[in-house]
Image (cartoon, helix red, strand yellow):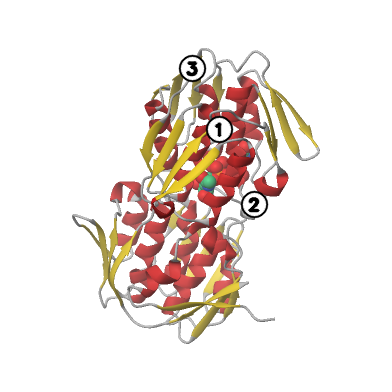
Amino acid sequence: MDQIIVRGNGPLKGQIPISGAKNTCLKLMTASLLTDEPLTLTNVPRLVDIETLSQVLESLGVEVARLAAGRVMVLSGRQLTSRRADYDLVRKLRASFNVLGPLLAREHEAIVSLPGGCAIGARKVDLHIQALEAMGAEIELEAGYVHAVAPGGLKGARIDFPFVSVGATENAMAAAVLAKGETIITNAAQEPDTVALADCLVAMGAKIEGIGTRELRIEGVDRLHGTTHEVIPDRIELGTFMIAPAVCGGEVELIGGRRDLAEAFCEKLEAAGVTITETETGLKVARGNAGIDAVDVTTAPFPGFPTDLQAQFMALMCTAKGTSRLEETIFENRFMHAPELIRMGAEIDVQGGVATVTGVEKLKGAPVMATDLRASVSLILAGLAAEGETVVSRVYHLDRGYERIEEKLGAVGADIRRTREHG
Ligand code: UD1
C-alpha cells in the first residue's frame, strides 16, 4: 500500500491546474444509460472513482472509450446487456447507486446493490427509493440488492424531499426525464454537480425547468439523444488547494478556479485573512505574514459551506489565532480526521456535530491514518505546515478523488512524496 510523506517546507509559490470535477463527472456518466446514442464527456479527471464507475457501466453493457490520454470519454449505451449492478463494484463507490434511476427509466427494471463509499455516517438511500416509488416503481430489497420494476414505465410524480440530498435529487431527476408526464421535485439539490447533470440532460433532449433552484419541473420525453459535455472544474479540489497557501503562506494561482463554484468557502477563507483575487486564468490565493484568524463554519447544502471542505478547513483552523467552532450538519460521523490532527498536536474538542478548535502555534509531524477521502487530504494539508515529517498511510482514499496530488503540490514547492508502505 502507498503512503505519502510530507514535510513542512515554507511558503508555496506557483500555479496548480484544477481538474474536472469528480462528482460532476460521475453523475454525467450515468446519463449515458438514458440513450442509445454516444455521450461524450471532456475534461474528465483521471481518478480511481471514475474508473470504478466505468466498470459498473461496462457491466451493464455501456461501451466506454477513452481518448486524449483519458481526458475524453465516449460512453455508448446502444444496447444494454444487463440490468444488474453487482455488489463487488457498487460497494467501492456510493455514486454507482445513481445508475438505478436511469437504468429503471430506460429498461423498466433495475437490480442494484446497496452502496458503500466513504465511511462518513449511515448514508441511507431511503430518499432515492421513495422518489422512484412515487414514480410508480415497485421496489423490493433482496439480499443486499434493490430490485426495482416499473412494468409500464415510470410516471411523473410530485416528490417532496424532507431535506436536501444530492444523490437522491440526481437519481430522481435522471429517472423523471424518461417518465410519462410531469415530475416536480421540491427541496432539490442546487449543487453545481446537479446543475451540470441537468444541463447535460437538457442538451440530450430532456425538458427540465428550475435548474439551479430548489424546485425542479421535469416533463418526460420519449427518448434522449447523445451530446458532448465538458466537466466543470472540481470545486472541492479547488478549495483544498486554496487552503494549501493559506496553511503554508505564499501565493498560488489555481488555474481554472471559479469563485462562483465555491463562494461561501471563499468568504470564510477571506474572513480568516486570506486574499483571493480573480485572474484571467483562475483564482490567486495569497497569505501575508499576519497569520490566520479563527473563523466559525457550519456546513450546509450548496450554496452553503460544503461538507467536503470541512476537514480541510479544520486543518487550517488548527494553527489559527483563537478558537473556531466547526459545525457539521450533513453527515453525523464526519470528524474522523480530528483524532489524527490531535496526534499532530492540534487542540480539538468534538461534541456531537460540533468541533471546537483552539489554534496552536505549530503542528508537529506524526504518523497518521487516512479514514476517508477528504479526511486524508486534511492530514496532508496539516503536514505541509507541521514541523518535521508526517506520514499519511492508507492513501488509497486519496487516489479516489485527487489526481496526482503529490505532483500538483510538489510543483508549488511542497515537500511531498509517495512511497510504498513497509510491513
Ligand atoms: C454527495 C457527494 C458527497 C457530498 C454530499 C453532500 C457525490 C458522489 N458525493 O453525496 O461528496 O459530501 O453529496 O454534499 O456527489 N440521506 C438520507 N437518505 C437518502 C440520501 C441521503 O438520509 O436517501 C442523508 C445522508 O445520509 C446525509 C445527507 O442525507 O446525511 C446528505 O446526503 P446526500 O446529499 O445524499 O449525499 P450524497 O449524494 O451521498
Element type where label 2 sits in the image:
loop
Element type where label 3 sits in the image:
loop
**Residue linked to disc 2:** 92
Q: Is residue 344 left or right of 209 when viewed as pictured?
A: right
Q: Is residue 129 left or right of 405 when viewed as pictured?
A: right
List x then y, in percent, for residue 275. Answer: 25, 64
Quadrant of residue 335 in the image? bottom right
Which quadrant of the figure contains the N terminus? Answer: bottom right
Can you say whether 319 is above or below 71 in the image? below
Quadrant of residue 245 in the image? bottom left
Q: Residue at x 34, y 78 (%)?
A: 413
Disc nearer the start of the sequence (1/2): 2
Spatial distance from mark 1 to mark 2, Cα to Cα?
18 Å
In this rendering, the count of numbered labels is 3
List x then y, in percent, for residue 333. Answer: 62, 56
> Nearest the camera: 313 or 81?
81
User: Which three-letter amino acid code belongs to the residue tagged 3?
Assistant: Gly
Can you say whether 361 is above or below 73 in the image? below
Element type where label 1 sits in the image:
helix
**Residue linked to disc 1:** 171
Q: Residues within 10 Å of mark 1 (few under 14, many from 20)?
A: many
User: Which three-letter amino acid code belongs to the residue tagged 2?
Assistant: Lys
Spatial distance from mark 3 to mark 2, Cα to Cα?
32 Å
Q: Residue at x 81, y 38 (%)?
A: 143
**Residue linked to disc 3:** 220
Whether the residues at callouts 3 and 2 have beta carbons within 8 Å, the answer is no
Q: Specify whether tag 3 is near ligand 1 (CB below 8 Å).
A: no
Let me know if residue 387 appears in the view.
yes
> Nearest the camera: 98 or 383?
98
